[in-house]
Image (cartoon, rainbow, N blue to C red):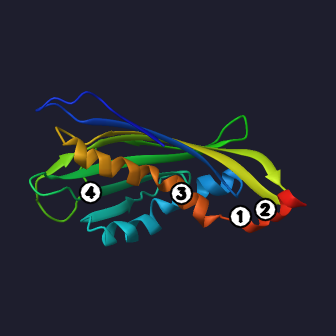
Amino acid sequence: MEIKYKQQMKGERSITLGKASGVADCTAEEAAAWFFEYCSRERTRIDREEGNPARFEIRKAHDRINEKLVAFIKKMPKLLNNRDFMVKFVWRKEENGSYTVAGISVDGDPDYGDTRKLVRGNSKFLITATNIKSVGSIPQCNIRTLLYFDLGGYVPTSVLDKRMPKALKILDSISRTFDQSEEVDKAALA
């Protein structure tokens, strides 16, 4: 995991870049599918537990099955306004056989049901899962994550230090979900 900040000056925007990579005991397609769905159902539950005010998926009749739009509000510490994001997710298979889930902030005015003051954040991410050599009969894939966050205005680095690792933790969640360490160890010993 690696995190970098753009030079921050009081009154300017706080921008954070993050990247992480790891291995999961599943196929690249399973990892991409898990992430694509995780960012809707399971993530909504986790957001509620973390005290974030809103998260929902926006569906339209003409939407493709490999795309979705998610709107959410992230709770910020006292004295900072909450941040709202509207992100379009796209999942696709690449020519080399890897799978990519990309996301980018889009314009829109989601109806959160109230009129509280929110600051619009901007996010971009790219998660790529590539199949690697299986260990015995256990498939494995390498996952790489790249993240860009602009929380809209000046945010202290202490807040950024807490937010980016949480976002990059998705790799750990994928690995734990598909963990087959005992089977991998047995196959390697055989």
Q: Position of residue 16 (x, y in %)?
A: 33, 37
Residue at image mark 3: 172
First-in-chain label (4 vs 2)? 4
First-in-chain label (1 vs 3)? 3
- The reply to whether callout 1 and callout 4 are in contact (CB within 8 Å) is no
First-in-chain label (3 vs 4)? 4
Give the Cα distance between marks 2 and 1.
Answer: 6 Å
Q: Looking at numbered disc 1 in the image, what kind of residue is underneath it?
A: Ser
Label 1 Cα crowd, 10 Å radius (few <14 / some 14-19 / many 20+): some
Residue at image mark 2: 185
Residue at image mark 4: 74
> As drawn, is 56 to the left or to the right of 77?
right
Residue at image mark 1: 181
Q: Looking at numbered disc 4 in the image, what kind of residue is underneath it?
A: Lys
Closest to the observer, 54 or 60: 54
Question: What is the quadrant of residue 82 in the picture?
Answer: bottom left
Closest to the observer, 6 or 99: 6
Q: Looking at numbered disc 3 in the image, what kind of residue is underneath it?
A: Asp
Closest to the observer, 58 or 170: 170
Q: Position of residue 100 (x, y in %)?
A: 59, 43
